[in-house]
Image (spheres, rainbow, N blue to C red):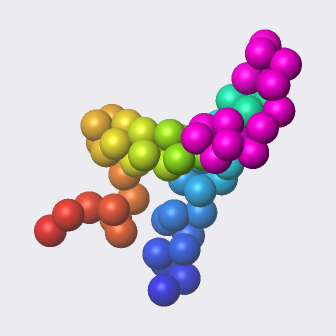
Amino acid sequence: MPSTLRQLLPHFFAMFVIYGIVVIAVYMVFDVQSFWISLAIALGIAIVYPSTVRSLGVEPEPWTRD
């Protein structure tokens, strides 16, 4: 179990950082602060990030499909 967490933690941290950067950029550019926009950004990153990581071939072991 600790091995799984150790493999996933960098990816969760990367998604968190990407989310923060995108939300700040959207808020600065469009000057709109809304829960729904933040939620849409979070869902978009949660869907796109794993697919991108898999296509680059750097997915952690727990994400591989056997």
Direction from residue 16 to residue 5 in the image, left or right? left
Q: Position of residue 5 (x, y in %)?
A: 54, 74
Task: Provide the residue span drawn in magenta.
Answer: 25-41
Q: Position of residue 56 (x, y in %)?
A: 33, 35
Q: Nearer the viewer, residue 57 or 45?
A: 45
Direction from residue 27 to residue 16 in the image, left or right? left
The magenta stretch spans residue 27:
yes
The magenta stretch spans residue 28:
yes
Q: Is most of the magenta stretch helix, strand or loop?
A: helix
Residue shown at 77% from the left, 15% from the top: 30
Residue shown at 73% from the left, 23% from the top: 26
Q: Position of residue 8 (x, y in %)?
A: 51, 64
The count of marks equals 0
Extreme residue in the left direction: 66
In what quadrant of the picture does the C terminus appear?
bottom left
Extreme residue in the bottom direction: 1
Placement of 46 over or under 1, stated as above or below:
above
Q: Nearer the viewer, residue 10 or 48?
A: 48
Placement of 32 over or under 15, stated as above or below:
above
Q: Nearer the viewer, residue 39 or 63?
A: 39
Residue 35's quadrant in the figure? top right
Q: Nearer the viewer, residue 53 or 48?
A: 48
Residue 34's quadrant in the figure? top right
Residue 54's quadrant in the figure? top left
Residue shown at 59% from the left, 56% from the top: 12
Q: Does residue 14 appear in the picture of this structure?
A: no
